[in-house]
Amino acid sequence: MSSSCSGSCSSCSSCGSCGEDKLAKKMGIISRKILVLSGKGGVGKSSVAATIALQLAASGRKVGLLDCDFHGPSLPTILGVTHKKLDYSETDGIIPLPMGNLKFISVGLLIDDPDQAIVWRGPAKMGVIKQLLEDTDWGELDDLVLDFPPGTGDEILSACQLIPGEKNAVVVTTPQEVSLADCRKCLDFCKKLELNILGIVENMSCFVCPDCGKSHPLFATGGGEQLAKAYDLPLIAQLPIDPEFMAACDSGTLPDKIGNFPSLIKF
């Protein structure tokens, strides 16, 4: 389509609207963007992102969930949709996978072999993120939740540069210092990019024995709370290691059992 026109066309109500930025237009009808981040790998960030998206959808909000972890997309497994593939329309672009009030996109649903390694450099990642944001038929949403790989690399920086307007972050950590040290860098990243930090989620805070009910801190205690206090941020939740939750994520039954687990939508 040409970037200029001499009169109205079939897709424009007035001359000149063809030249509007497509990405800004798509993102403009999404009320809130929530980036789920962590400086440390292995803290359960994807399961937290899935929980937030599913709980928001269960509350009646229209939600999109975008898996930006291209090298290890785990959300298709957590949501039980590894057997699904995304559709494409010439007019609407990529069609997200519908799951009730939730629309889901993942590179894991675009490749034929789930064990295939994706080898992309930074510029390629930025191009893919732009395409998934711009060429996806998101429609009007209350929330778009984006799940990222750990660290402060290409994927997060690209999304922050591409998405216009206010962007919100939820930072996930575990209680021990090795995780907190990386998450402090993540919080500094959020500050530099002027992200609105909604709060801290401390995952794997303890293990509650199913036999005696006693709480056992396997790593450390209170790290997430200390981090939240140091940065004057809300502590959204301290989540124990829950075998039932882990089994639901592994088996892909989390969407059906989401009501059994603590609420993370305190923002």
Image (cartoon, rainbow, N blue to C red):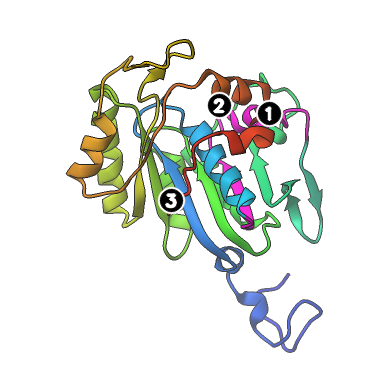
The reply, left or right, for residue 124 in relation to residue 160 is right
Report the residue that reaches farthest toward the left: 230
Q: CA distance from mark 1 to mark 3?
A: 23 Å
Q: Let me know if residue 138 is in the magenta part.
A: no
Residue drawn at x 20%, y 43% is: 229
Q: Residue furthest top?
A: 211
Q: Three-letter amino acid code at disc 1? A: Thr
Q: Secondary structure at mark 2?
A: loop
Residues at marks 3 and 2, CA–CA distance in whole angstroms: 28 Å
Q: Residues within 10 Å of mark 1 (few under 14, many from 20)?
A: some
Magenta stretch: dominant secondary structure: loop
Q: Earlier in the sequence, mark 1 or mark 3?
A: 1
Left or right, 60 with respect to 44, comes to: right
Residue that badge 2 annotates: 72
Look at mark 3 in the image and give the residue it sits on: 266
Residue displayed at 21% across by 36% down: 226
The span picked out in magenta is: 60-84
Q: Quarter holding the C terminus?
A: bottom left
Regarding mark 3 in the picture, which secondary structure is present there?
loop
Point 28% across, 44% down: residue: 187
Query: Crowding near pointer 3: few (<14 within 10 Å), some, many (20+)?
Result: few
Lower sequence index among marks 3 and 2: 2
Q: Nearer the viewer, residue 59 or 122?
A: 59
Q: Which residue is mark 1?
A: 253
Q: Amino acid at mark 2?
A: Gly
Asked whether the beta carbons under mark 1 and mark 3 sit within 8 Å of each other, the answer is no
